[in-house]
Amino acid sequence: MELLVASAIGVLTAAGLYLVMRLRSFPVILGMSLLTYAVNVFLFASGRLTIGASPILTDGVEVYTDPLPQALVLTAIVISFGMTAVVVMIALGAYLGADDDAVDDPADDAPVEDVQ
């Protein structure tokens, strides 16, 4: 179970980093989302990977799950959803303003050199 979760975190991180390094805004947004998912799975896995374990300590319970990572993941999901919405709106505004979603566009006031 631990190998499967660790592999999933590694694949999500690698795919997220690959997409973040692209030169278009939409793959960058997808890459940031994948990195967020990787961090969420990592935080969730840090609370022990047990099936059917209670997150609350009661008398007679031998195996339990730490509830703190679950609360952290719920908070991280809400924050990542809000940040994704903000970044999508910024990218949409940049696309509509320039008719291109390339990240490496030169600034309008930068001098353009003539190539001969």
Image (cartoon, helix red, strand yellow):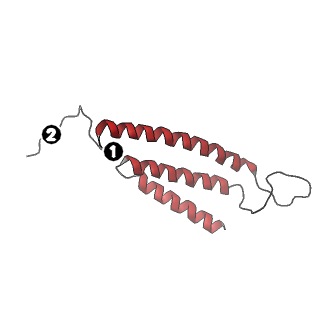
Which one is earlier in the sequence, the residue at label 2 or at label 1? 1
The picture places residue 64, in percent across and down from the top left corner, at 80, 57
* Residue at 45% across, 47% down: 29
Q: Amino acid at mark 1?
A: Asp
* Residue at 54% across, 39% down: 82
Observer-side mark, 2 or 1, equals 1
The picture places residue 69, in percent across and down from the top left corner, at 69, 50
Q: Residues within 10 Å of mark 1 (few under 14, many from 20)?
A: some
Q: Which residue is mark 2?
A: 113
Q: Is residue 116 left or right of residue 94?
A: left
* Residue at 62% across, 63% down: 5
Q: Which residue is mark 1?
A: 101
- Camera-nearest residue between 48 and 88: 88
Q: Quadrant of the N terminus?
A: bottom right
The picture places residue 104, in percent across and down from the top left corner, at 30, 44
- Camera-nearest residue between 15 and 93: 93
The picture places residue 40, in percent across and down from the top left corner, at 60, 52
Please, which residue is most extreme toward the right here? 59
Disc 1 secondary structure class: loop
The dot on residue 59 is none
Q: Residues within 10 Å of mark 2 (few under 14, many from 20)?
A: few
Rounded to the nearest angstrom, the CA distance separating label 2 from label 1 is 23 Å
Q: Amino acid at mark 2?
A: Glu
Q: Is residue 99 left or right of residue 83?
A: left
Q: Is residue 53 left or right of residue 43?
A: right
